[in-house]
Structures are given as structure tokens and as C-alpha cells.
Amino acid sequence: MTDTHSPAYARPERRLLPQPTAESAAFWTGGRDGQLLISRCRACGHFFHPPGPVCWRCRSTDVGPEPVSGRATVAAYTINRQPWIPGYPPPYVVAMVELADEPDVRLITNIVDVPLDEVRVGLEVEVFFEQWPAQPGPDDSPVWLPLFRRATATVGGAR
Amino acid sequence: MSGGPFDGKAVVTGAGKSQVGRRLGRTGLDLTIEAVTRAIADAGLSVDDVDGIASYPGPGVPDLGFSGASITEVRNALGLRSRWYLSSTETAGQIGPAIEACMAVTLGLANHVVVYRSVWESTAQAGAGRASVLFGGGTVSGHLEYTGPFGALSAANWLSMPAQRYMHDFGLTREQLSAIPLNARANAGLNPDAIYRDPLTLDDYLNARMISEPLCLFDCDVPCDGATAVVISRRDAAAGLPRHPLTVESVGTGMFERATWDQRVDVTTMAAHDVAATLWEHTTLRAADVDLAQLYDGFSFLTVMWLEALGFCEHGKVGPFIEGGERIALNGPLPLNTSGGQLSGGRLHGMGFLHEACVQLWGEGGERQAPNSPEVAVVGVGGGPVGGAMLLSTR
Ligand SMILES: [Zn+2]
């Protein structure tokens, strides 16, 4: 038997955490100000992910993090049923979401607060952030993980 | 046949396999030496005739039984005098070093190169899940930086997403997908070295525990201990050897998009599609000429990707192609993963497919020998962001 009902999201006891680097720090800490910061090329205007020192499309190095709307669409998902991490019990939804600002930029994330049988390709979602304490590393800042839940209103009033 | 990237000069002259099993309690080096020396003897050579050695992945990767033995360890253990050697992970999948060995013999850098892959994951990870061993520290880095925090630690998670999208877009069903693991298990029943040999039914599959939907337990391969090896020779150096040399007609090494699990423009395609495109660029042979397919099945969905990437069916049409399993059965027109693959045979991690292709082309599959007397075999290895392919023939 596999349950399809998801209780209201409660943060897990434990997550494996990133140790932000000079390149990824903005992505992991933008949530401090409620912003999803994605690398953007100032030469061609496109966003890209994961963060890096150069734009893979036009090879400009004039790149840096910029806020996006935080709206996205589920491109693909899985309901993970296997326990991998003590303190983070299944089931949980892992998804690739496509950013409204640049649909071929995808983030791996969790879709939460949506019943498991209602998660589907095309579901419109929006970001929120979950703060976790600093890990030892080059940057000892706390991190804000971008998670997604059902969008509260659609962009431009569509639907 | 002449032509192709190696102009017919690169040939396979021998193949060998160690004991394969669960928790054998043997070291990776021990298993490696068994496979390597068997392959060399199978080619009718002695260690002193072998002047090249190549392997995936070499040292420097998290171990846990993933890297059975480095080239340095094997060379030192055997006193092997090599004129050329190489190990690599950043190459065309786990058979990348075999492709590089073809280049080395063609260029005259070596006459006979032994290529091996060995794992002892079953023993090394005994008693502890891979995740708990790898991630005990609580942090993730590298490409896991962007997946691990969300509980997506396994390729089962990364692959189940494109599998789900493929099912959504093209209507592939779990019943259709089951043909891959059911075929593997049927073939494994005829392979005395396979890990899982008991019959598997559609009901077993449909009722199996989900790992990461839509992939269930039987869509995931099984870690094992074991090593496989082949000898790649230059044709003129192989004169007088006992085996009919198998020609390496072409290889696939393409990688056109960024190598990630999630940023490929079309998430219903993978590196296999780029690899296959380059494989067919180098040869006049076509998918219709292939008699036997050995396609990576670390997860069943990867085999789906290889089948369509190589052109056995159109993009999105794998479901009807594999439905019922007749086309890919041992007695079908395209026998697939005849040793049981990694799903039932054990995760020999890529080289097992090359080994099995050679055994079948030599007609030595025993009970599991494909009855269509294959003359052309394709080997596709890897998945997600990496892959490599080889096309072999008896011509
Ligand atoms: Zn640019």
C-alpha cells in the first residue's frame, strides 16, 4: 500500500546541507531577504543554473545573481519512497521546476503542502524558504533552502 | 570490415570475468587479477605479451567498493610492463577506457591492452546503506550541492523524474517498462553467474515496493562484487591468436549538452542520444544491422533511453517497442542484456555489457546463447549525463 495523502508540511528533523561557495552563496542565502537569486548573464540577459563564473550560452563573464519572481512550473517529479537520510523520512516529493523567468532553467527542489496525488507536470508553484543553521566551511552563513508550494495566484491573472 | 574510426585495426581478442556474487569477502584487487588474467589467457596471451592497461574509474573517487583496483595496483601486482596506460572517469562512460584502448592500439602505442572494471560494493557496503556511508557528515558538495538538500541523493531520484516526464509525455506505462527487468530476469535464469535467477512475473513487478515513483525495486540494479575484463589488440598483432578477432566498427563518445541530470534542454533525452549520434556518424552500419544489444540497465529507464537513442525506435515510442518483451527476448530479433544485465546479473558497472557482447559474438553464451547467431552487437553504457557506446562485429 502506498499512501497518497500528504499531511501539512513539517520541516524534517534533518537535511543534508550545502556549504556555500563564492559562486553558490547568493543562491543559498537570498532567502534571508525573501529573494530567489539566480545567476544571470548581463550580456545576453539569460539566466542559468547552477551558478558559475561564465554564461554557457554566450560565454560572457559579466554574470551575477539577480532576483527572479519565484514562480515556477513542475517539469517532472518523483515521490520518493525510500528512506535515504535518517531524520528525513519518506514519502516526499522531489521535483524539477522550470522558472517562470526562464523556463529552461530548472531547479531540483521539494514540492510541499500539495497532496501527493495532486502533484503533476504543469502544476504552478511558488518559492518559499526554509532556514538551516551554518555548516562548517568556507562560508559559515546559515542557508535558506528554496522549496516550492502551490502558487497562490497565477501570473497575470490567467486561469 | 575496414573503415570506421579505427579502420578495422582495433579488435577484441579475449574476455574474462571473475567470480561474481554478493558479499564475497574478497578484495577488489583479488577479483580484478582474476578477471584480468582470465581475459589475457582467453586471448591466448601471457601477461608479458600485454603492453597496455586501461580502466574506469581509477583512484581518487569515493571508494566504498566503487573502484576495485587502480592501474597502479594491478600493474604492481602482476609486474605488468606497460607501454601505454590510462584510467579515467571523465570519459565516455564506464567503457570510455576501452574506447581509448582502441585508439592506443590503432596508433601503435601498444599491441595488446587489457581493459577492466571491478567493483566490490556488496562487500564494502555490507551492513550500511551507501547513503549513510557517504553522507554521514551532514553536508553535500559538487553536483550533490543542488540535489542532496532536497533528499534527492540517489540516481534513482534523479532518473525517476525524467522517467515520470517520459511517461507523461509519451504514455509509456509501467506494464511496458516491466519488459526490461522481466527480460533481464529471464536471461539471468540461464546465467549461472547471475545474482538473481528466480523467475520474476508481471505481478511481482507491479506489486513491488516503490523506490522513487515511478521506479520500483525491480527497476534498480543490484550491487555486487565482481570484475570483468577484455583484451583489445591491434589486428596485425592478433594474427595467430586463437579467437576470431571482433572488429570495433565504431564508437560513440558525443556529449553535446551540459552534463547534468536536470538542465538538458529536453529532459526526455539523455547523454545516450548524443553518444548514439556520434556512433552512427563513424560507420555505414545502421540500427537495422544490429543483431544483439547490451544496453546499460543500472535503472530500467536507462535501457529505454538507449533503445530510442540508438534508433531502434523513434523518440517517445519505446513503450510499444518493448511491450510484451518479444522483440528483446533471447529468441527475438534483438536479444537484449542476455546475461541478465545489471538488474539481475549484478552491477558490474558497464564493462559487463562489453564482456557479454563478446561472449555472444563468439557463440559461447551456453544456455543463454542468442539463437540468432549475432554478428553485429551494440554496447551502450552509462546513463543520465554520461555515456559511451561501441559497435562490434565478427566481420
Ligand atoms: Zn550570456
Image: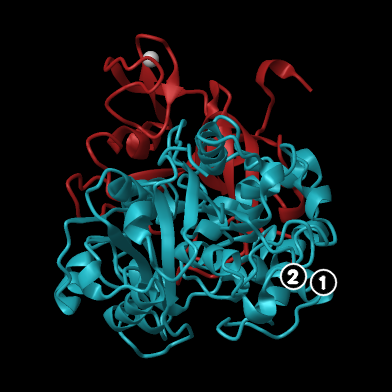
- Quarter occupied by residue B365: bottom right
Where's residue A147, x and y in %?
Answer: 51, 44
Residue B210: tell me if it is visible.
no
Where disc 1 sits, the SS reads helix
Q: Colour of chain A?
A: red
| Chain letter, cyan in picture | B
Q: Residue furthest front?
A: B240
Q: Which mark is residue B202?
A: 1
Are there few (<14), some (14-19), or many (20+) residues within 10 Å of tag 2?
Answer: many
Q: Give coordinates of residue A97: x percent, y percent.
A: 58, 37
Q: Which residue is mark 2?
A: B182
The label shown at residue B232 is none
What residue is rendered at 35% in x and 11% in y?
Answer: A42
Q: Are marks 1 and 2 in contact (CB under 8 Å)?
A: yes
Residue shown at the point (38%, 53%) measured from the top left: B235
Q: Residue at x 40, y 27 (%)?
A: A38
Query: Could you tell me how far apart the alpha carbons at marks 1 and 2 are, in whole angstroms?
Result: 7 Å
Mark toward the viewer: 1 or 2: 2
Element marked by disc 2? helix
Q: Residue A71, percent across and down?
A: 58, 28
Q: Would residue B323 appear left or right of B131 to someone viewing this image?
A: right
* Image location of residue B336, percent across then percent down: 68, 61
Q: Amino acid at mark 2?
A: Leu
Tag 1 and tag 2 share a subunit: yes
B137 vs A119: above or below: below
Q: Chain of mark 1?
A: B
Q: Nearer the viewer, residue A123 or B14?
A: B14
- A105 on left or right of B136: right
| For residue B150, above or below residue B310 | below
How dense is the environment of label 1, judged by Cα within 10 Å: few (below 14), some, or many (20 and up)?
A: some
